[in-house]
Image (cartoon, coloured by chain):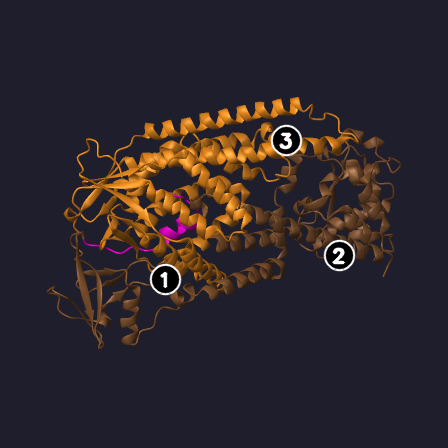
Chain colours: A brown, B orange
Amino acid sequence: MNIRISGRLYDGVSATSTPVKAVCDGSGWLSIEDVDFGAITIADIQFSERVGTIPRTMQFPNGKMFECDDNDSIDRWLSQCGHQTSWQHRLERNGSFAVAALVALALVILVSVRWGIPQISNLIAARLPTEVDVMIANGTLEALDETIFERSKLSDLEQRPVLERFNQLAAYNHEVNFNLVFRGGGWIGPNAFALPNGTIIVTDELISLSKHEDELGSVLLHEMGHVVHRHSLRQVIRHSWLAMLSLLIVGDVSSAGTLVLALPSILVQSAYSQEFETEADDFALARMREHNLDPTHLANFLDRIERCAAFDGDAISECDGSATINRENATPQTSGWLRYLSTHPTNERRTARFRRPKD
Amino acid sequence: MNSNGNLPFPVWAGFQFDGSASEYFKIWVVNVLLTIATLGVYSAWAKVRSESYFYGKTSVNGSSFRYTADPIKILKGRTLSVLVFALFWILFNFYPGLIVWTLGAALLLFPFVVVASTAFRLQNTMYRNIRFRFDARTIDGYKAMLIPLALIFGLTAFIYGAFEASEFAMKIEAERGGEFRREDMIFTILLLSELPLIPYLVFVLRRFVINHMRYGSAAEYFVARAMDFYKIYIKFFVFSFGVVIVMGMVLGFVMGALGLTVPNELDSDQSAAIAALSGPIIAAVLVFYAVGFYLLGYLNSRLMNKTYNSTQIGPLQLHSTLRGRDLGNLYLTNTIAVLVSLGLLIPWIKIRMAKYKASRTEFLAKDMADISAIEQSDTTAIGEELGDIFDLDIGL
């Protein structure tokens, strides 16, 4: 049976078009009505893909092109001659598949963010030599010294017990080359940092805030946990995967003018960061039990640091355990939904784990 | 649609975009799902289907455009660009000492990317069975862009060199906080030293691309001057600056009227003060974002109008009448729509943006039959994909 399709014929030499009718027969031959065109077999015709309802074209070997809006007739002729509609178009015109795809998409995103990305990143990190961690840390301490830290005001005599304690706690581990440095915290105040090469930085302000040598020891263990679990490296890898995933989902949407695509990424990154803090806490907790230290020391210390964080850096001397500050007021940044933007778990959640009796 | 005035063209032909959001939504969902399921491999096919849809639904004078790219070529280009991107990522992150040279190498790739991606896109654009072409060779791209790129690189390297060694750098970084890598500042410096050169670079790029475009036997000519682009950017910066000042004054006035002050001493009342301040500050930030969309709308509409209205295709003339406030409205509502719908409205915002742009673009034609096809050579997809992943928007 012949199929007649109305469309336009372009000669490929000028941009003019002629309205024509194509006559397609069941044995796969095409001719054009009222035009001296000859017959062309279906095997020599290049059909454009069917995408939505855009015009369909047939490109002929002689450079001429037939274009029409009658997608269905072309598909009918194709199937008469034993050709199938493209599988993509069959998916794309199917409304229920679209719904199913949406559900699948939500699941895929959820699963890859929650499990896929962390697992793959851990696998990759495990295969990378520790030299990579050292490379990431390259030049960081120097940059920090130039920008934030000041020279430590502690004397050798004051540093020595901390250093001894540190070496004691670090002694069990032979894979990482741990190294403790003392610095004035500058505007950062009481804090401790771990660089991926095993250098741990502790500020004078943190040392003067500690009331018990095990308090400081617990923080040092927490920082060692970051190094041992290679959090810097894993974070870099996770963030790269995350960037890739959002690129795959969103593609090029900038042309339509939206600037909000960074937001979901930031939320996920904070969640990953909280996970790392918890892992470092676990490490500290396990080591403290090993060394028969009381885990409540870390809880007490965290509480005190948090209370002092509410003060100006200068006010630290007033900031001791006896200061009576309403805790709710002192931690406005950890309440409510803002918690999801925070890089650390809330202090209550953290300290509760250390106050819990040994199970 | 438009009065002819005294232009020598008898026919005005408006662009038309008649895609539908619901139809494109189904195409988009399949694209995204298959892209993720194949870990990105399908993205090449997804791009062809998506572009085909937008080209096919854009018509002028009753005929629509066709996108004829081969997904395999796009896939090859995409693979290569991922490798190049990874190389630069490693260089920028692990070799901070080489950062100036890494940046130089990236800038050196730019003309290659422009030429290859423009050639690929144009050769795969058909209208009335005649292909567009790009007749520039890579070397022409280097000749055209050498001066602005050398200026940008020289200025950035010079300022960064001075900055790296200065105490000022440390102060700035200490104030910004959390920015531990001084090397990252090179991008800020790049941006700042580019600032006076951006209008010139944009002008050079568009002149180069348009002067080398061909449709059939018709050459395209770009008749704007660098000064036109400087005027647009200077107006944009004056407006932006004015907005910042006015908003600062309004915020100060509102806070003063409400009896709020920024606390000097942080004490136990701190949280109350922060809570009281956060309302106006959050409001100010939101208003600032909203105004930013309109400023951006102003800039993009003027740039596009200037470009189109300076473009002649043989005996034909392009004409664009985008309005800043329309684009601003679109940017603002598009952003809200994507946020509220968790991304589900992305297809819709793409469709409505294409609709608006087409409705404001026209084409002056005398006789389409004059334009005859020229022989065609093939090109690879490499440049196109580098352009994609580096997001070098070379929008025409």
Give the residue at x 28% y 35%: B309
> The residue under label 3 is which amino acid type?
Pro
Residue where numbered disc 3 is placed: B280
Tell me which corner region of the image, top left, top right, bottom left or bottom right, holds residue B80.
bottom left
Q: Chain of mark 1?
A: B
Quadrant containing the C terminus of chain B in the rendered view? top left
The residue lying furthest to the left in this view is: A36
Q: Is residue A64 left or right of residue B197?
A: left
The x and y percentages for residue A278 are: 73, 53
Q: Nearer the viewer, mark 1 or mark 2?
A: 1
Give the residue at x 28% y 38%: B319
Q: Are marks 1 and 3 in contact (CB under 8 Å)?
A: no
Is A143 covered by the magenta stretch? no
Mark pair 2, 3: CA separation: 52 Å
> The residue under label 2 is which amino acid type?
Asn
Q: Check residue B342 in the rendering and tell me which mark sits there, or answer none.
A: none
Residue where numbered disc 1 is placed: B72
Give the residue at x 29% y 58%: A55
Residue where numbered disc 2 is placed: A173
Q: Is residue A309 above or below residue B65?
A: above
Mark pair 1, 3: CA separation: 53 Å
> The residue under label 1 is which amino acid type?
Ile
Is B381 covered by the magenta stretch? yes
Q: Give the mark, 1 or 3, whose residue is nearer the N terminus.
A: 1
